[in-house]
Image (tube, rainbow, N blue to C red):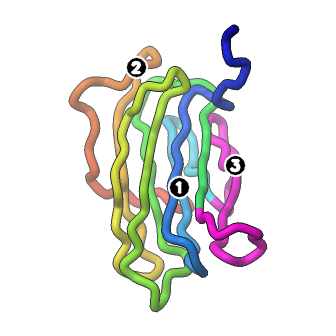
Amino acid sequence: KEDPAQLPGNMVASIAWPSGAIDVDLWVKSPGDDAVGYSRRSGLVWSLLRDDLGTSNDSTPLNYESAFTRGLPDGEYIANVRCYGCAGKVPVPVAVEVRLADGTLVWSGVVTLVSDKQEKTALRFLMKSGVVVPGSASHVFREIRGK
């Protein structure tokens, strides 16, 4: 039988970082909408599943955040990471993965944050008709937090 478990949306972006009192935030942006992150947990397309605060309010050592989309409108998508509470704990390697619900890996890699409050772009890419536009992926920084 087919596995009834399915990803919660059309695309999932996730980040993970070392255990401890380190607070890294995932910020994602879709075409025609404001960025989604800890202070704006849901938009027209993206929804943040959990704001992981490191060891605060957490019963496990895992540090992990993820967001998913509802639909895949054409245009540019951005996934950023930000060191919200990393003072004295940098550098912080952050594993980033963006995957379509059908299992297609869009990008996987590590972004290293080197200062507190630093924001870095993990990935920017274009979608057209539910498919990643070949050759459109880049890591060129674009600030999206709070925009």
At x 60%, y 55%, the residue is 65
- State which quadrant residue 89 falls in: bottom left
- State which quadrant residue 58 falls in: bottom right
Q: Is residue 64 above or below residue 2?
A: below
x then y, percent, for residue 55:
68, 77
x then y, percent, for residue 124:
35, 43
Magenta span dominant secondary structure: loop
* Residue pointed to by mark 1: 27
Q: Amino acid at mark 3?
A: Leu
Q: Residues within 10 Å of mark 2 (few under 14, many from 20)?
A: few
* Residue pointed to by mark 2: 131
In the image, 109 versus 43, the foreground residue is: 109
Say what secondary structure mark 2 lies in: strand
Q: Amino acid at mark 2?
A: Val
Q: Which residues are magenta?
A: 38-63
Mark 2 to mark 3 CA distance (whole Å): 23 Å
At x 47%, y 78%, the residue is 117
For residue 49, the mark is 3
Q: Is residue 54 magenta?
A: yes
Q: Earlier in the sequence, mark 2 or mark 3?
A: 3
Q: Is residue 87 above or below residue 141?
A: below
Q: Earlier in the sequence, mark 1 or mark 2?
A: 1
